Image (tube, grey):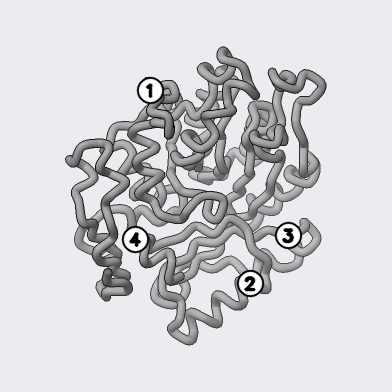
Amino acid sequence: MKECLSKGVTSFQDAGVSFEVIDLYKKLVDEGKLGLRLWVMVRTRNEELERKLASYKTINYGDKRLTVRAIKWSIDGALGPRGAWLLEPYSDLPSSKGLNTSTVEDITKSAQLAIQHGYQLCVHAIGDRANREALDIYEATFKAHSEKRDLRWRIEHAQHLHPADIPRFGQLGVIASMQGIHCTSDAPYVTARLGASRAEEGAYVWQKLMKSGGVVSNGTDAPVEDVSPIASFHATVSRKLKDGSVFYPDQRMSREEALKSYTLNGAYAAFEENIKGSLSPGKLADITILSKDIMSVPEDEIPTAEVVYTIVGGKVAFRR
């Protein structure tokens, strides 16, 4: 919590904890010790979800400090160790298409539980096969429950997509919950893993997703990356690698798009856009003050901006 507040994070989307950890979060809220706001995904086996989901759904608990309304699964691994699940073999390991880490059947069962109990489903999917399988599960579930609207189910990472699947995010109302910093961290080996054609067609295609009607929200995937949003914001607008090269610059976000992806879109991805994501009357006074205007300084200066104040609920929670 202290690290998040020191780096300007007022709300954190926790991508998967047990019911026991949620009990701890509630205890911290009751004791007035939860310094930032948490939106939480539950991560456990279906048998336990079936028993406990109904009693654990929580919206804006304790001065809007805690919300529990999502389920998390991982359908594949990561690209670096060639664990992302691909439609075609790895360019640098033709014997492998990556890993399917949770069965389609298990995730499909969770999809039924999610729609039954009013939870969002959030599936970690990095490879193009993983994303297609997740979208297929979502689409089938939505068709079977056509009376349900505005579900805002999410794919966490959505890093490598087949071109045919890019428009499906907008068509299905599925949120691409991405992390700008992953693009520049992964870029040195993306082309080796996927080949130039696949990398250009479907790797971190933020503009293609947005132009086809998809909502892209932004994050940092802490602790895989540093929790500070400033580095990820810079990666989102620059896509610049340490060697100075730029990874497919046509997919960069403008500063306005990047800011929205981190604020209003992040709030929208949690059904919180009416209380968070912008500074307007009636919303929570959660405010981060930076030492530099990241919307106007030269691009290379963005990473040098520091958090001066972090304000949660109108009270200063961190002061540099």
Circle 3 SS class: loop
Q: Are marks 2 and 1 in contact (CB under 8 Å)?
A: no
Q: Position of residue 244 (x, y in %)?
A: 38, 28
Q: What residue is pinned by disc 3?
A: 44
Closer to the observer: label 2 or label 1?
A: 1
Q: Is residue 63 above or below residue 242?
A: below
Q: Position of residue 80 (x, y in %)?
A: 65, 35
Q: CA distance from mark 3 to mark 1?
A: 39 Å
Q: Amino acid at mark 4?
A: Gly
Q: Are marks 4 and 3 in contact (CB under 8 Å)?
A: no
Q: Position of residue 44 (x, y in %)?
A: 73, 60
Q: What residue is pinned by disc 1?
A: 249
Closer to the observer: label 3 or label 1?
A: 1
Q: Position of residue 253 (x, y in %)?
A: 34, 31
Hey, which quadrant is residue 242 in on the image? top left
Instruction: Tell which residue pokes out farthest to the top in this image.
Output: 197
Circle 4 SS class: loop
Q: What residue is pinned by disc 2?
A: 21
Could you tell whether 302 is left or right of 246 in the image?
left
Going 25% across and 72% down the picture, which residue do you hit?
314
